Image: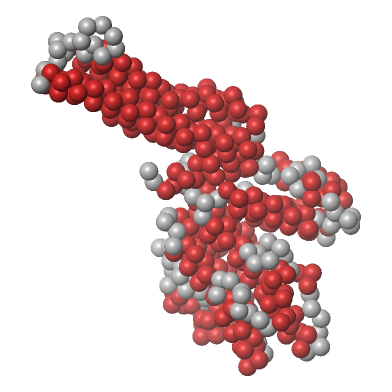
Amino acid sequence: MTRSIDYGYAVSRLRAMENRLLDPGAFQRLLDSEDLPSAIRVLSETSYGKWILEQQQENQFEPAIEAELQYVYSEAERFVPDPGLYQLCRLPYDIHNIKVLLKGLFNQKRGGVRRMDLLTALGNIPVDDLVMAIESEDYRLMPFGFHRTVPECVMLWEQAHDILQVERLLDEKLFSLQLLIVGVMPFDGARLFVRHRIDAENIRNLARLKRMGYEAAQAAPFFHNGGFVSLDRIVSLINEPFEGWERLLAFADVSKALSGGQEHADLDSLLVDLERSIDDYLTGVLEKFRYSSFAPENVLYFLWKKEIEARNVRIILVGIGNGADKAVLRRLLRHV
Amino acid sequence: MDQLGIMLAVLGAALAAGLAGSGSAIGVGIAGEAGAGIMTEDPGKFGLVLLLQALPGTQGIYGLLTAFFAILKVGLLGGATVSVNVWQGLGILFACLPIAIAGYYSAIAQGKTSAACIQMIAKRPEETGKAVILPAMVETYAVLALLMSIILLNSIQL
């Protein structure tokens, strides 16, 4: 018997849980809301409802989104046989928390304030443990090799006082950790997903750095190893006009994320659409596994879809709260 | 030598019941796991899940039926004991193999198909009819194997 049979229960449960994902109709109703309170009322009729009811303050939706994601992750942890699959999805939150805490620490040293409200409970490492480790500078018990990375970040900051270098180091750590986790998994889909994700992140960085006017040599350290497209090829694109990127990367799957790039007048408008098309591209990478009833990659597919759903909800609610044009909001929504 | 003939016939019966039954146990287990996953979220689907989970269980019944035929033929299930030489015993053993082998593999395959169809009804309960037909297609080959085992058993002259 193959190991994938172990996922019979998990995949079936996730299929049933998929029924609770918001459908296009629900997103449309959210978009049609006149103002933020009415959008939150619409949201309270969905799976997010039970968390909205627990809110102490009116017009607060972020804690409800986080609580729903937390619920989904904790449920998945109970029945997914390979912890690596959900750890993979929670790692970006650990990195986010470490960035928040380190920035707070560096800010404090310069007389600034710490933003503890930006911490999220969605990471693998409990927030309290993380805060305790970083505040007491006792990194020994930090998992995932962070006991080495965090002091390295602190040292880097003390030498250069450049927060970008610290962020870059942590991002590098994120992808190397993800590659490490999927490297020991006995199935290929997770590895493919991480490698495609690295390619997508490199393209995102490429567009941002190009907009900021970076030269190839300056931009090179911001790209990550491990994707399908070589770093040399990615770095060389920074000297090319963005309209030609899709053609130059036509040999790689990630070029799909750049399709329609020629239609954009400038990099700003490309970047807005790129965020969405990168997410859609990554959804496409995992989508093919949905037809396999026992594929462990279905776990990643479901968790990724839940993340995308939360992103869509956030886009709509923030947009409505700020009075954004509904047509623009609709264009920003990811495919779920 | 008569004893060896009978033993070979008994081995055939044991393989038919044992292998087909094992396949069914695995198949029902696979479908059951999928069913449990669905029912954790939606207990109302118990009826549909039970129907699909039971489908891979039929190979075990076919194996048992063939085993009964085999031991009935050599008179181990009451009546006068029949004299069975080695060649006749081997014939009975070989006659039991179609349902033993096809029963084992088809039950596992049917279990996987049932599990996939259980996942299908989780999302589309209105498609239950189609969900039953797909695993039933796998059943065809178990039925063909049963048919062949019975024909072969009947063709052996004692």
Of all residues, the one furthest to the top in this rendering is: B79
Residue A85 at x, y = what percent?
54, 57
Task: Please determine whether, in this image, residue B146 is positioned above or below residue A220.
Answer: above
Q: Quadrant of residue B64?
A: top left
Q: Is residue A272 left or right of residue A111?
A: left
Q: Nearer the viewer, residue A88 or A217?
A: A88
Residue A172: tell me if it is visible.
yes
Count how many numbered circles sit on residues in the image. 0
Which residue lies at the image location 38% right of the left edge and 24% below the top edge?
Answer: B60
* Colour scheme employed for the rendering of this structure: secondary structure
- Asked which quadrant contains residue A91, the reply is bottom right
B19 w.r.t. A40: above or below? above
Residue A327 percent location from the top left of the image: 73, 52
Q: Is residue A207 visible?
A: no
Foreground of the two, A95 or A199:
A95
Q: Is residue B145 left or right of residue A334?
A: left
Q: Quadrant of the N terminus of chain A?
A: top left
Residue at 71 percent of width and 40 percent of height: A25
Name of the residue lying farthest toward the bottom: A159
The residue lying toward the viewer, choosing from A196 and A180, is A180
Q: Residue at x 37, y 32 (%)?
A: B22
At x 85% / y 54%, what residue is drawn? A55
Residue A241: x %, y % from top left: 53, 73
Considering depth in this image, is A154 or B8 the residue closer to the camera? Answer: B8
